[in-house]
Image (cartoon, grey):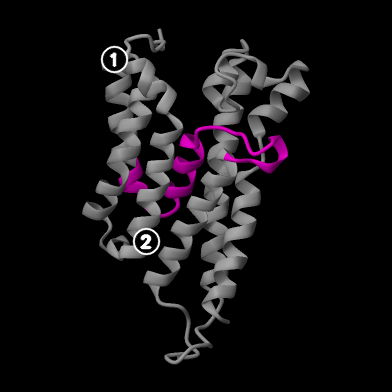
Amino acid sequence: MALGIVIFVVAVPSFLLGSIPFGYLLVRIFRKQDIRRHGSGNIGATNVARTGSKGLAIATLLLDALKGYTAVAFAHWVAARVTDSSGAYATGEKLPPETIIMLMALAGLCAILGHMFTPWLGFEGGKGVATAVGAFAGIAPRAVLVSLALFIVIVAITRFVSLGSILGAIAFPIACWWMVPIMRDPVTISLVAISSLLIVLRHRANIKRLLARSESRLW
């Protein structure tokens, strides 16, 4: 199968899976409210918690992470079952591990994009942190643990969830390069870096508030 077709087969379902707005749906179903009218207007778990339902916030967190993980697992399932059967250097053999990892990183990026720009909510969405954690836990779990550890330390010290998320996102590509040699391929590490950059950019309002010292603390 041509690699271009495999990329399409991986990218589109991953984006659609990532676009499921679990936070919006859970609050709408169980509290009859529009989460976009509360707090920051974000559909993620942190804003869901502001509605007063910790249970829905936890469910949102887990489901958002699960859709990222599922997208990556789907990409692995597809990539592991196709062969390189096109192009000048076609071998008819299974795709090499480096290509499979690249496709998994692509799936992660597409799931994050789907969460951030869900077509079901006018291409608005969340910040992608939980979806990214779920997605990349399926590719580089040790690197994810490094980012999560940094997140916990930063939040514990500063009480700023946004700052922990931003620094955790920045640290992730570095941890991947350091701890997962197979991800040092330029395309793969670029996909991971773009995912992290998107998360940082989605926090630009938080960055402005942090600089202005007006950001809300966790407690």
- Determine the secondary structure under disc 2: helix
What residue sits right under mark 1 in the picture? 158
**Residue at left 65%, top 21%?**
36
Q: Which residues are drawn in magenta?
A: 117-144
What mark, if any, has residue 143 been given in the picture?
none
Q: What's the residue type where badge 2 is placed?
A: Thr
- Earlier in the chain: of badge 1 and badge 2, it is 1
Q: Write the residue at 57% across / 69% down.
A: 78
- The percent coordinates of residue 152 (x first, y second) are 32, 25
Circle 1 SS class = helix
Residue 132: give x, y in percent of width and height.
46, 42
**Left or right relative to 1: residue 101:** left
Q: Seen in the image, is 175 located left or right of residue 195?
A: left
Tell me: residue 71, above or below residue 97. Answer: above
Task: Please tell me how crowded label 1 is: few (under 14), some (14-19), or many (20+) other residues with Cα within 10 Å.
Answer: some
Q: Is residue 201 left or right of residue 57?
A: left
Q: In this view, does 111 lie above or below 154?
A: below
Q: Which residue occupies the foreground of this view, 201 or 138?
A: 201
Residue 88 drawn in magenta: no
Q: Mark 2 points at which residue?
A: 188
* Residue shown at the point (55%, 74%) measured from the top left: 4
